[in-house]
Structures are given as C-alpha cells and as structure tokens.
Amino acid sequence: MRGSAQRALLTGLAALVFAALVVAHVPHVNGPDYWEWTWQRRSDVVIVAIFFLLAAGPALIGYASRKIVLIALSVIALQFTANEVQTPIRSLTRIDKVAHNQLTTSYFTVAESIVKANGIDWLGQYDQLLRLAPQHATTKPPGPVAFYVLLIRAAGPKHAPLVIAIAIALLSACGVVVTWWAVKTIAGEDAGLIAATLLALSPSMTLFFLYLDPVYPIFASAMLGTWYLALERDSRRAAVAFGLILFVTTMTGYTLLVVGLVLGGMTLPFLKRRSTYALAAIAIAVAIACHALFAVATGFNPISAFRTALAMQAYQLPLLHRPWLKTIPFDILDFFLGIGWAPLVPATFGLKQRRSLTIACFATPFIVALTGLIQAETARVWIFMMPLFFVPAALEMEKWAPRERFAAFAAQLVVLVALYANMQFMK
C-alpha cells in the first residue's frame, strides 16, 4: 500500500473511531464536566444519514467538477437540512425560538430593543449597552448587533428570524468561497477546492447553524489571502485591502485577532525585506483611519468598547467554572470534534510543506488552548480557525488519489451523522 493510501486509511480510521465513541456515549467524548454537549439517542439515524448525504451531494459533485458554487451551495443545504431534522422542534418554529432565546443568540434580543427604541444613539452609548446586554453580546464589538438591527428593520420583527437565518446560511456559503480563494491564492486551485470542501463538510458548519459563528471563516480567510498577496507581490493595494478587512474584523469579533499568529508565521520569511515593514504600516494605518472615521461619524469609541468587552469577559469567565489547565485538552478535543476529526491526519502530514506557514496554521488552535485565550465551547467558537487548519490538510491531500480524498470527505460525513444522532448542540 502506497503512502497516500495509508494516510487516507488513517484518516478514515480516526473518524470512524471517534464516531464509534460517540455512538457508544463514552463519557467525556461529549466534553468535560464543566461543559458537556447533551447526549441523545435517535432511532431515525438512517433517515438522518440519507438526508445529510443528499445535502452533501452538491459539495461532492462540486469538488469532482471543480465548481466552488456547488460546494458553497452544499453548506446552505446541510444547514437547513439540519434545521428540518432537529428535535424536538424544527423548521420555522425552531428558527423563531432560537432567535428569541437570549442564551443562544442574544444579538437578536439586543437588536430588537434598539429597533423598538427608535432613534437611540446605541453606537455612541455602546459601552453602557455592553454592560446591560445578555450573554454573547456582552463581549463583542457592534458588528453582530448591527447585522441584526439592519435585518430586523428591513424585514420587520415578525419575519426577521427567517431572513436572518437565510442571511447566515448565505454568508456561511460565502465563507467557503473565501476559504477557497485564500487557499487557492496560497497553494493553488487543487488545494483551494480541498480546503473549501473540508470546511463545507465540517460538522460545526452544520451543527451551529443559526449562530453567527459559521460566518466568521470569511474574515479569517480574507485576512489570510490578502496578507499573503501583500507579502508575495509586495503589493500596497493588497495591504490596503488587508487594512480594510482588519477594520471590519475588529468590528465583528475580537477573538478573530488570534489569526495574527498565522499572519506572523507567514511574515517571518519576509522580515529581511524592508518593504515588509512598510506594508504592515500601511495595513495598520488603514485600519486605524477607518476606526477614526467611523468614530467621528457615529460617536462609537472603539478603545473604550474593547476595554469594556475585556472587563465583561473577565467578569464572566469565573462564573463559567472553566479551570484553565483542564480546558487545554478539552478545548482541543472539542475543536477536533468540530472539524470531524478526519482532517487532523492529513493536516499533521502536511506540516512537511511550506513549514513557516503550515506550522503556524496547525499550531494556532494549540497555542490558543495552551494560553487560555478563548476558553469556550470551541466546536462553535473556534470555527473561524478551521480554514487555517485546513491549509496543511489541503497541501497533503492534493497529493492523494481522488478516491482517497473522497474517502476523507465521507469520513467527515460519518462523524456529522454520528454527532447529530447522539448529541444535542442547540435546544
């Protein structure tokens, strides 16, 4: 058996072993004692598997025909399929309930209050809003709330939950497209298609539909691709584009800034070039200028909002009872759960190529876990790091035979079905 076939076999075995542990409800496979995904046992697992296979069909066909649109379309199909086969509530009823659940997506609650208080200067008073907001919104910049405010005003409170769900699905698909573009830019078309397919079939992209997290790969991948272009082509235009993306990113989620670990690894080979420092200065200057202009136009104070978000996180973290040392292994395991375990094998072997880049991509979730920077239900919160992790995986898998790649994709689907039939991620 040749090397790639052995690696493909290991990939499948990794996924199948994990799926078996899930089906057997082995303790702590669903998380540690301080945070567990709820066990369940569905009797309709065959039907669920058929529906998911049909929804994943466009991704598999799209990969075979090299059409990124089909791969992206599969994300939308998987997400709405998951919503339809969810228990105990499904379809529009579930979409509406999740939107109004303050513990699930508190952005809707905050945005609805802003819309009802017509004319309120909520951006100018964002610090006070953070202190009063429920759950997730308390540690975030205004981007997510603004997203909900815009759609509630456009569709009205009654129809907004469905419109928001459709928008999240479309943006999730855009995340797959941007991942394809970024990895294609760095490593070529084949690697781009592989990375996009791995992301589209990752369990987390489906399991956490209706959260905003499946949207966030857009930002990680866009930063990755534009900064690579800036460095490789010594392009000031790309540096300006990166600065604009960095501004939007810092207005969306502060946790996304850990992508800087990969950007730093990417930059290391270029530090001897003087123009690299000029590119970094341009990018940072553009981001700061955008924040300054936005502050003048709206009254929003980005520095104060960041400090308040950090203070709210420092206040909340002890209440969650997540002991730092204990979170290290379980945060990593939950991240692997989110990618479906299968990509771990090719990502490990992919470290032999483009070392400064692949090691930085592979190491980022481990560094985040070791430092305790983002202690959370990482299968969801770390979705934005998945495109980074798929860079070394794609570089390895592009050397495999087509049937070996499809075996890896199938392994991800097996894990997805096992998780959906045996755990509850959103009630």
Image: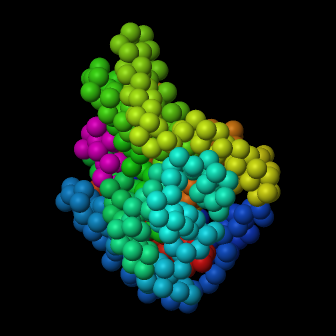
Could you say where residue 206 lies in the image, as x and y percent from the top left?
45, 68
* Residue 264 position in % (x across, y down): 49, 27
Residue 184 belongs to the span the image colors magenta: yes
Question: Could you tell me what secondary structure mostly forms the magenta stretch?
Answer: helix
| 352 left or right, relative to 380 | left
> Is 106 above or below relative to 139?
below
* Residue in the image at 79% along x and 57% along y: 319
- Residue span colored magenta: 176-189
Residue drawn where x is 63% and y is 59% of the image: 133
- Residue sitting nearer the eye, 327 or 292: 292
Is 102 left or right of 45, judged from the image as shown?
right
Q: Where's residue 189, x and y in %?
A: 25, 44
Q: Residue at x 51, y 42 (%)?
A: 300
Q: Please check the rendered image and state whether residue 235 is part of the magenta-colored stretch, yes or no.
A: no
Q: Going by the picture, which residue comes out furthest to the front?
A: 119
User: Residue 6, can we see it?
Assistant: no
Scheme of colours in the image: rainbow
Q: Quadrant of residue 244?
A: top left
Q: Residue at x 60, y 78 (%)?
A: 427
Is residue 38 depicted above or below 272 in this figure?
A: below
Visible residue check, residue 63? yes
- Answer left or right for 86 relative to 223: right
